[in-house]
Image (cartoon, helix red, strand yellow):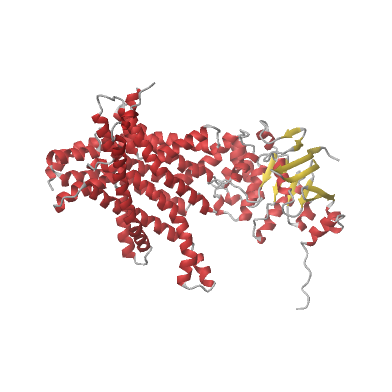
């Protein structure tokens, strides 16, 4: 293993990691937004929109991100929607992640007993107050494990961004392997950088899950 | 009318070629699934083993596989082992190795989860009824485990099928690659082919995965109560 | 007699084809304690839920001081502030401490001052013997303690009438008493209450009037002594017999 090589190309990997993280975080933020709105539509059984959301969830969950990205990046310009590669990455991640987040939040919302809502209503709360103060905080806490699993899943999914010519970690590794045949070093750095990104999130996830499982609210 | 470029697929054998590409992806998934399920069952049982060392080893294996994006694993096996072990691995072979390693880990975790999900008093109460250990497993524990496990493993299958789209990135000519070739070859005559062809690829993936997820959802609902 | 607080006229409630309440007429006076008894499935819990507008009704009307309580109507949150309800399963909010449980509705719904609510909440907690639990979470309390907190939570809204839906049914026997004592105390203070219960001795002690429901109808209505000592209808006699045992002979 050539440490010199590693030192030389470290900045390239750093830039790539920043790009991966940037698109990952923005994409996940939009995925959370899409997921929350979808979950609320499903929870309140909003007519018509509910069916559209269900269709969206099926489409999003049953197709690979890579195919979604190809369609958005190469297909959409043909019907006049031309998006920059980074925006494509964000849109793709939001489209894919939205349905996973929706499921996480929906099952959180549905895990709260109906009678909790009734008891809040009986105190004179409006439907909005019931959601805001009673159901939502509890639902969020219940959906934390699924939520964290989704965050990790989506961060890992960002690895396909190189397919739409974003210079992310995979792109960099493949580039260096192709150019210099320094396979071991290139792959070593690839793994290291993914570990730096994913390990903390994964540890945080299991920490939160353990706390929720054994403690819940109080102590 | 807007030209969506789907007509390209009706030229010559283009659509058949696309389906051929889908078959390559399916073949990789099917072989990997067929190997992962028995290996995963074994791993899952070992993961509930009383031996701390065995549990630890499998835990490390699972976490290591899990934390890496599957594409990184594909790169490691395809580019890394070729270099380190000096063999010549085809993209398809590398894909199968990665998906079996990954599938076994995920399946093992599902099996472990299902096994420990059966409450302890289920064992106790069946033994209190005078059942032997074998009978307890056969009539009480196994049916409950299977009901939990089956929908989850079917979901794993859809995940595997979706993940096979990645093999494009290590040079396997599967559906996406064929799609690219078709679009490229017809660049002059059908400019909008990228929309139509990738739309069809999208739909084909959906058609393959959707029945599995419906089945999983159906079984989950049926066995919930 | 005092003014009528709650008036129920010809209430009919059905789920699909099943009629649960079939023409209920009931008036509750200011300061009166009415106990609803009857076999399970007779509709007494449903009646309470209708009084609180938690269920849509098919016919008739529920009025609180001349205002109509109707499921889904706009003024329901306002009306519900005047009706305190306590559930069998406590339904404290698990993500809030005891004190927060007591304060959330007065502060968010009635927009009262935090300090004032807190003072009142702590005072009421002290009255039910739970002052030291103010900062704990519901899951750290016993069932009886939770139910006392739930009662206090309803009281903090200054309701004009209190509804109790089998509030001791989920409790271990030794905890039943502590909850019933709180309710007896409220009765002494002259609160208006409608209570659904299976505790017959308690019903007798607390009630001004006993209503016996069966098959979705009011079958008998009497003072507690009359009802328990000399029920007029066969159905009431049969129902009350369930609570007494005969000695096992030939042992």
The quarter of the picture where residue B52 lies is bottom left
Residue, far bottom: C251
Q: Position of residue B221 (x, y in %)?
A: 51, 50
Q: What residue lies at 76% left-to-right and 37% top-to-bottom?
A: C59
Query: Does any portion of residue A25 appear in the rendered image?
Result: no
- The front one of A24 and A174 is A174
Q: Position of residue C122 (x, y in %)?
A: 62, 45
**Residue drawn 67% across and 61% down?**
C173
Frontmost residue, C208 versus A170: A170
Q: Is residue B134 above or below residue B197?
A: below
Quarter of the image with the N terminus of chain B in it: top left
Identified at 34% across, 53% down, the residue is: B33
Q: Left or right: where does residue B5 sit relative to residue C204?
A: left
Outermost residue, top direction? B1
Q: Toward the viewer: C27 or B224? A: B224
Q: Residue furthest front?
A: B12
Residue B185 drawn at (x, y percent): 23, 30
Name the quarter where the C terminus of chain B is drawn.
bottom right
**Quadrant housing residue C249:** bottom right
> Against C143, is B200 above or below?
above
Q: Can residue B154 be seen?
A: yes
Question: Picture coordinates of residue B27 (x, y %)?
Answer: 30, 48
Q: How many numbered callouts? A: 0
């Amino acid at each position: 293993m050539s440490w010199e090589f590693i030192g030389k190309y470290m900045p390239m990997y750093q830039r790539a990691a920043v790009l991966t993280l940037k698109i990952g975080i923005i994409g996940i933020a939009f995925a959370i937004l899409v997921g929350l709105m979808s979950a609320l539509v499903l929870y309140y059984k909003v007519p018509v929109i509910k069916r559209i959301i269900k269709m969206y969830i099926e489409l999003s969950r049953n197709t690979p991100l890579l195919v979604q990205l190809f369609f958005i990046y190469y297909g959409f310009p043909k019907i006049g929607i031309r998006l920059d590669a980074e925006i494509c990455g964000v849109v793709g991640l939001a489209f894919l992640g939205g349905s996973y987040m929706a499921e996480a939040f929906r099952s959180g919302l549905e895990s709260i007993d109906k009678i909790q809502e009734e008891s809040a209503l009986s105190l004179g709360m409006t439907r909005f107050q019931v959601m805001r103060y009673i159901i939502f905080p509890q639902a969020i806490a219940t959906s934390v494990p699924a939520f964290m699993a989704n965050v990790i899943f989506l961060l890992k999914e960002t690895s396909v961004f190189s397919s739409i010519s974003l210079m992310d970690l995979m792109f960099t590794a493949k580039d260096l392997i192709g150019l210099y045949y320094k396979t071991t070093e290139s792959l070593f750095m690839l793994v290291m950088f993914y570990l730096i990104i994913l390990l903390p999130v994964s540890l945080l996830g299991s920490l939160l899950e353990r706390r929720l499982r054994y403690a819940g609210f109080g102590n | 009318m807007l030209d969506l470029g789907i007509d390209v697929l009706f030229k010559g054998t283009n659509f058949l070629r696309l389906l051929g590409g889908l078959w390559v992806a399916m073949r990789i998934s099917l072989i990997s699934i067929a190997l992962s399920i028995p290996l995963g069952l074994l791993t899952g049982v070992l993961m509930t083993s009383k031996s701390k060392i065995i549990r630890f080893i499998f835990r490390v294996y699972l976490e290591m596989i899990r934390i890496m994006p599957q594409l990184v694993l594909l790169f490691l096996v395809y580019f890394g082992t070729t270099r380190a072990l000096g063999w010549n691995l085809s993209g398809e072979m590398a894909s199968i190795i990665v998906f079996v390693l990954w599938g076994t880990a995920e399946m093992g975790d599902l099996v472990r989860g299902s096994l420990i999900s059966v409450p302890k008093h289920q064992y106790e109460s069946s033994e209190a009824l005078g059942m032997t250990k074998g009978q307890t497993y056969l009539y009480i524990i196994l049916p409950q485990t299977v009901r939990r496990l089956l929908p989850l493993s079917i979901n794993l299958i859809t995940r595997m099928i979706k993940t096979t789209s990645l093999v494009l990135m290590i040079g396997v000519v599967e559906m996406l690659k064929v799609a690219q070739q078709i679009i490229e070859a017809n660049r002059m005559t059908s400019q909008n082919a990228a929309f139509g062809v990738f739309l069809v690829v999208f739909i084909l993936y959906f058609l393959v995965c959707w029945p599995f997820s419906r089945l999983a959802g159906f079984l989950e609902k049926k066995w919930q109560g | 007699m005092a003014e009528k607080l709650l008036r129920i006229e010809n209430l009919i409630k059905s789920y699909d084809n099943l009629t649960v309440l079939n023409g209920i007429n009931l008036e509750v006076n200011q300061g009166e304690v009415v106990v609803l008894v009857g076999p399970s499935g007779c509709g007494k819990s449903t009646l309470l839920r209708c009084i609180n507008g938690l269920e849509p009704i098919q016919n008739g009307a529920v009025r609180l001081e001349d205002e109509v309580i109707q499921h889904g109507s706009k003024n329901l949150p306002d009306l519900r502030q005047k009706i305190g309800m306590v559930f069998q399963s406590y339904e404290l909010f698990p993500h809030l401490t005891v004190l927060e449980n007591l304060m959330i509705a007065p502060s968010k719904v009635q927009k009262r001052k935090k300090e004032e609510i807190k003072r009142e909440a702590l005072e009421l907690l002290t009255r039910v013997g739970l002052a030291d639990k103010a900062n704990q979470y519901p899951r750290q309390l016993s069932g009886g303690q939770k139910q006392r907190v739930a009662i206090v939570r309803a009281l903090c809204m200054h309701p004009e009438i209190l509804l109790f839906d089998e509030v001791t049914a989920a409790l271990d026997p030794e905890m039943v008493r502590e909850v019933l004592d709180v309710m007896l105390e409220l009765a002494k203070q002259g609160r208006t209450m409608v209570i659904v219960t299976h505790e017959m001795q308690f019903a007798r002690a607390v009630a001004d009037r006993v209503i016996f429901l069966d098959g979705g109808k009011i079958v008998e209505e009497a003072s507690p002594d009359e009802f328990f000592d000399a029920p007029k209808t066969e159905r009431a006699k049969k129902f009350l017999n369930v609570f007494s045992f005969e000695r096992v002979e030939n042992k």
